[in-house]
Image (tube, grey):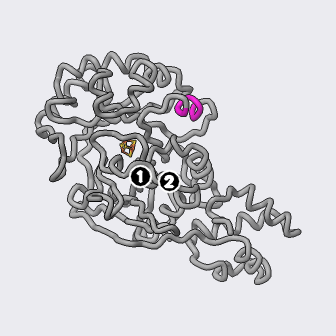
Amino acid sequence: MINIKSLSLAELGAWFEAQGQAPYRARQVFQWLYQRGVRDFAEMSNVSKALREALAADFHLGALETAQIQESQDGSRKFAFRLHDGHVIESVLMPNNTQHTLCVSTQVGCAMGCDFCMTARMGLVRNLSSGEIVQQVVEAARYVSEGRFIRNIVFMGMGEPLHNYEALVRTIGVLSEDMGFGFSKRRLTVSTSGLVPAIRRFGAERVGANLAISLNGVTDAVRTRLMPVNRRWPLAELMQACREYPADNRVRITFEYVLIRGLTDDLADVPRLVKLLHGIKSKVNLIPYNAGPDSKYQAPSLEQARVFQEALLARGVLATLRISKGQDIQAACGQLVQAGRRNAPRARAAG
Ligand code: SF4
């Protein structure tokens, strides 16, 4: 049986045609799936009983079991969703007034091995299907209260999104479908550790979502220490791919830069960073490292983080300082990891 949430509108339309039905019926079903968040085909009241039964015979709705929800003091919620094969993934819903940002996972674990990241400790277990990525949005949307909505989706949870390229692009298509969630692609952000060929492909195929690069080092020595991917695609190649990225005039590439005490928070790194970014329409998102009990690195002082930001701003670089949400529930950047592995609808988006 196929997960219906993995299907594009056109594919579902083709299924209806094969049943001798008008393809527009797929639009009705998309509304039920994403705007109403139905849990049973039987709830689709404007679809005939025979068709509902045919849908139920060929497809399942891809529901995820909510294994755990943790609430942070700052209002963030971390969801642990159990997949059909028992693996658990995590998503984080972060409120901001009436608008929310949802961080979704794209893989169980991750192959990239970043030294500061809890997910890296799992290694790669498997890719998520597009339906499993989309369903994280469906499930999280149930927890968004009246008058509020999910405004942004960031592909920054467990996994390297561009390492699961086909499912990622399919997911972006489903999420941005008008008859479904209707997200503007400008509200979808894909964060990569720096898979250069996939970055080039993502740009060439004009997928349209925002691109964020997890940079975290201004020399190859430091970046390779933190991110093994840098051995394969060092800074010069990565930055060249960014320079050649076919972004239109409105779009900036976001560079995420984790500030680690004594390693990446030295003010001497600021001019190096400015030089790396030369010729790229960019913004820098500074993220103070979240030190956990068994972390090998240390968080910078807030004062040092602010000084680093000011130094970038003084050189004309657009730089924000993100104080990670959900730190008390280990939902902050780099802290997502499957439980148990550590030691061994208000669904419609405003476009
Ligand atoms: S930071 Fe991202 S790319 Fe690196 S290991 Fe963690 S999940 Fe993977």
Q: Is residue 62 left or right of residue 238?
A: right
- Report whether residue 139 is seen: no
Ligand 1 neighbours mark 1 (CB distance < 8 Å): no
Residue 287: in magenta span: no
Report the span colored magenta: 198-203
| Residue 239, quarter of the rendered image | top left
Picture quadrant of ligand 1 = top left
- Report whether residue 278 is seen: yes
Q: Secondary structure at mark 1?
A: strand
The residue singled out by tag 1 in the image is 109
The residue singled out by tag 2 in the image is 126
Q: Amino acid at mark 1?
A: Gly
Residue 201: in magenta span: yes
Ligand 1 neighbours mark 2 (CB distance < 8 Å): no
Q: Please name the residue shown 53% across and 41% down the image.
A: 209
Q: Is residue 293 left or right of residue 93?
A: left
- In front of the other: 20 or 75: 20
Residue 168, x across and y down, in percent: 56, 47
Q: Please name the residue shown 77% across and 76% down the image.
A: 54
